[in-house]
Image (cartoon, helix red, strand yellow):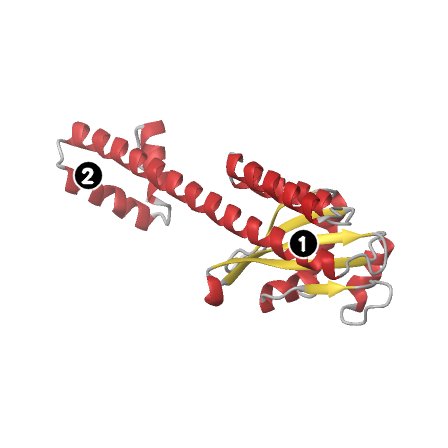
Amino acid sequence: MVETVDEAADVFARLAVELHSAGGVEETIDAVVQFALQALGCSYSGVALYNRGRRPEIPAVTDPVVAEIYNLQIDEGAGPLIESMNRQAVVLVRDTAADVRWPTWAAEVTRLGVRSVLDVPLAVGGASARSFGVLGLYSPEPDGFGPDDEAIAHILARHASVAVATARHEQTMAQAVDARKLVGQAMGILMERYELDGDRAFAILKRYSQDTNTKLRDVAQQLIDTRKLPRT
């Protein structure tokens, strides 16, 4: 854990460099959880990401116990992680052995050797920000997180939020570029084989995508790989 202002400044300066040089979403999130262990008095850390209409994703944990703690809450739909995601607020559990908000979860987490939990939302967008995930911090000691830890966790979460959001955007853009290339190649195959113009070739790919309930890029990839359109 950092103990002085100079140490904190050094840690977060290195974090900024690490996040900037991370190669993608997974690498960025892994850097966040590893730095959490350095910057705070915690034994474990993890990140859970919100998936609209689907089960939350757990892309990085420093120990399997964190995934178990997350899954307990996701399965039951209750716990500090769910509370932090839904309310977009910091949730602190000072002692799992004494917490009465989620008794079943707390008892199980106490059995796993975790006594205090600090969940901090990841969000971008200023005052109207929407949370897209949670940074979870865990200690085997009761009252393991004090006001200084909360302040550092807030700073870490802000760094992480921007870095993860940027990495996800870059990944989405790269996937979009890749999809356009695949569709272009598939159109070329149809145009050459059936002497079609570009509009007609695209219309065929789009119709097969709709009829088979398959993403357009996947229809294009199948055509490129097999030289055949999917069955309708």
* Residue at (32, 46) in percent of width and height: 209
Q: Nearer the viewer, residue 206 or 63?
A: 63
Q: Nearer the viewer, residue 122 or 67?
A: 122
Q: Is residue 169 above or below residue 109?
A: above
The spot of residue 70 in percent (x, y) is: 69, 54
- Sequence-first tag of 2 and 1: 1
Residue 20 visible in the snapshot: yes
- Left or right of 134: which side holds 175? left
The spot of residue 168 in percent (x, y) is: 47, 46
State yes or no: discs 2 and 1 in contact (Cβ < 8 Å). Answer: no
Quarter-of-image position of residue 82: bottom right
Amino acid of disc 1: Ile
Residue picked out by circle 2? 201
Q: Nearer the viewer, residue 59 or 159?
A: 159
* Residue at (43, 46) in percent of width and height: 169
- The numbered dot on residue 152 is 1
